[in-house]
Amino acid sequence: MIEIRGLAKSYGPRLAVGGIDLVVPRGRIFGLLGHNGAGKSTTIGCLLGHLFPDQGSIRVNGTDALADRRLALARVGAIFETPAFYEYLSGLRNLRIFAECTAPVPDSRLLEVARIVGLADRIHDRVGRYSHGMRQRLALAQALLPDPELLIVDEPTDGLDPEGIHEIRTLLLHLNREHALTILLSSHLLSEVELLCTDIAVMRQGRLLYSGPMSGLPRTEGWIILKTSPAGRANELLRAKGWLEEQRGEDRVRLRPGIGVADAVAVAVAAGLRVEAAHPIEMTLEEFYLQTVHGDHDA
Ligand code: ATP
């Protein structure tokens, strides 16, 4: 859906994006992560045609976005900067005004997007009476007006309470699954990204440190929990076989490469030990992210 190659952008002497390649496959929910100033907004700005890159190419749905921006973005919906609404007008009037300024759509479509985002009951109310979460849903309704195939959202849950965060997450998952939308989002809320995204890219100082599916994150690093009774006896056996590389506390061990949990369990069972727990230890996304941005991990 998105293919960015060699994208570079500087603001005067300040390098914001330093020649990145980023591919967002169709149908995915892709999280763009990075500290403040990492280059996420600049990348999205170039993608949406708000900024012109110094170098590189951008293809959206197969179209060269730098040569034919209008065609490339025809089926793209975006919430990039916090949208400003007319407080004293209804949600519906706001949507209508937005549509008149961009691409007119019939009222039936306005009501349809209001229904999709769960605002059908309140769409005739003044926006001034909307909660923060409802405004965010109205912004999503606005982004859905062009019937997009790709939705780009900057910090979709920023400033929302836990219920609002849950609602927006549920809505984005619904749009992805039921309406086949590919979603690119930037976020600092890693616990949300973990629940929502199928893929992530991690940026630091304009460089891409990691890009790939969540399922492929190198999260285990060989550490496992091996809890046996009597406690600690399994570790002695594994050490004697030369299979144990490191140990933390009684139950956490790192095995030699090529030796898995099942091998360790087999040793314990063969020695007549009772195995109470045996599984790999997975890093959380937050741990992976922090290790990536603070280490020298390159994509
Ligand atoms: P945040 O999470 O804070 O939004 P970001 O990852 O989106 O950060 P960018 O906004 O793309 O990062 O900024 C990348 C770099 O470019 C930063 O060093 C920033 O200070 C700089 N920068 C961004 N916009 C401008 C601008 N208009 N003029 C000068 N420098 C800029």
Image (spheres, grey):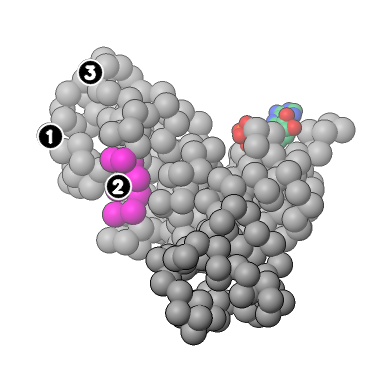
User: Given contact means CB atoms under 8 Å apart, are the residues at marks 1 and 3 in contact?
Assistant: no
Identify the secondary structure beneath mark 3.
helix
Q: Which residues are magenta?
A: 166-174
Q: Which mark is residue 129?
A: 3
Counting residues from the start of the chain, the first of labels 2 and 1 encountered is 1
Q: Nearer the viewer, residue 169 or 10?
A: 169
Counting residues from the start of the chain, the first of labels 3 and 2 encountered is 3
Disc 1 target residue: 121
Q: Residue at x 22, y 31 (%)?
A: 92
291 sits to left or right of 162: right
Q: Residue at x 78, y 33 (%)?
A: 11
Q: Nearer the viewer, residue 166 or 229?
A: 229
Q: Nearer the viewer, residue 231 or 7?
A: 231
Q: Is residue 47 visible?
A: no
Counting residues from the start of the chain, the first of labels 1 and 3 encountered is 1
Alpha carbon of mark 1 to alpha carbon of mark 3: how far? Answer: 13 Å
Q: Residue at x 28, y 34 (%)?
A: 163
Q: Amino acid at mark 2?
A: Leu
User: Given contact means CB atoms under 8 Å apart, are the residues at marks 2 and 1 in contact?
Assistant: no
Q: Which-is-in-front pick, marks 2 and 1? A: 2
Reply above or below: 83 against 228: above
Q: Residue at x 30, y 47 (%)?
A: 171
Disc 2 target residue: 171
Question: Crowding at label 3, few (<14), some or many (≥20) Cα neighbours within 10 Å?
Answer: some
Q: Amino acid at mark 1?
A: Asp
Q: Write down which quadrant ligand 1 falls in.
A: top right
